[in-house]
Amino acid sequence: MASLSRRRRGLDFWPGFVDALASLLMVMVFVILIFVIGQFVLADAVSGRDRALARLNAELSALAQSLSLEKAARAHAENQLGELSASLAAAQRERETLSAELQQSQTTLAEQRSEAARLGADIAALQRLKEELEAEVARLASALDTSERGLKEQTELSAQAIAQVELLNRQLAAVRSQLEELNKALAVAEAAARDKDLRIEELGRELNLALAARVQELARYRSEFFGRLRAVLGERKDIQIVGDRFVFSSEVLFPTASDEVSAEGMIQLTRLAETLKTLAAEIPTDLPWVLQVDGHTDRRPIATARFPSNWELSTARALAIVKFLRNQGIPAQRLAATGYGEFHPLDAGSSEEAYARNRRIELKLTSR
């Protein structure tokens, strides 16, 4: 028992404690290492976000500068447009004044030509009378030898005839002098008329250039309108842009053989109206734009009490769209409706696909 007791007192727990303490220390070192790595990764991520934020701020500053330049350019363009409009109005007034002057000059010229024609007729009559008198003088002179009495009478008649001829010659000279003066005045009037024609032609060219500029401006707004409308309506096979027209398939807006706008059609037309109102606020008020709505059908005939032919159906559909847009706030003077029936097809075929292409509503932003 004594030896067993000594053996128990001799047991040593210190190595196990040291091993446990070493393991705990290694775990703490591993945790600290993980923490350090996490701190490094977090610091790198924060630094990357700071760099990205600085880059975005720089891009935002550049965009703000570009926007400011665009606004300044737009204000300059609007000022130029106002100046061009004033110049166009002045040119039109000057053209009207010149046209009135030209008309007055043409009237005066016509009167002078009429007077010259009348004087020419008088000259011709006087010349004929002169010739007749000269013939009479010759006839009387040939009869001088017939008798003394006859000689005396013929002498008296000859003297009277010569006096009349001299008087006619003086009158003829005066008429010719007046005719020369009229010809000079006519030449001056024709020169003035040519100058005015040249000025009118020049004004016409300037007017055409101004009108071409307005047409180009309208084309720019048309392109912007179609772009916005395409973005609002989305990419759809039944809504296309063909040339300068935006084409809706009739099935998108109307039931078959009807002019009542469908529920889906109301949605599409509401989007159209909102886009048009947004663009209308940007178009200058003096630009005479109109949204033209054209209705088309296929060539299959229709004969009902409401629609005796495809003309009535296409016109009724175009009017229905115009009325809907007017109720959405589009001014009535900016809208026009036309029905073409089946007479302007896009596809001359006889298949269902061709009929579907020809049943359509076309929108065109144009000028009056």
Image (cartoon, grey):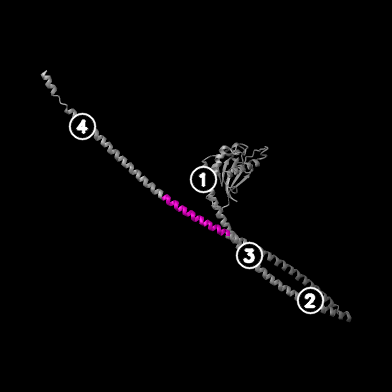
Main SS of residues in magenta: helix
Classify 124 as above or below 283: below
Quadrant in which the N terminus appears: top left
Q: Earlier in the sequence, mark 2 or mark 3?
A: 2
Q: What is the three-letter code of the residue carrying label 1?
A: Arg
Q: Is residue 65 magenta?
A: yes
Residue ID for mark 3: 194
Depth check: give the residue in front, 358 or 293: 293
Residue ID for mark 1: 228
Q: Earlier in the sequence, mark 1 or mark 2?
A: 2
Mark closer to the observer (4, 3): 4
Q: What is the three-letter code of the residue carrying label 4?
A: Ala
Kind of element beneath mark 4: helix
Whole-percent x, y for residue 198 in the image:
61, 63
The answer to whether residue 174 is visible is: yes
Contact? badges 1 and 4 (CB < 8 Å): no
Whole-percent x, y for residue 343 in the image:
64, 43
Contact? badges 1 and 2 (CB < 8 Å): no
Q: CA distance from mark 1 to mark 4?
A: 73 Å
Q: CA distance from mark 2 to mark 3?
A: 42 Å
Mark closer to the observer (2, 3): 3
Residue ID for mark 2: 165
- Res. 22 mark: 4
Q: Earlier in the sequence, mark 3 or mark 1?
A: 3
Depth check: give the residue in front, 146 or 171: 171
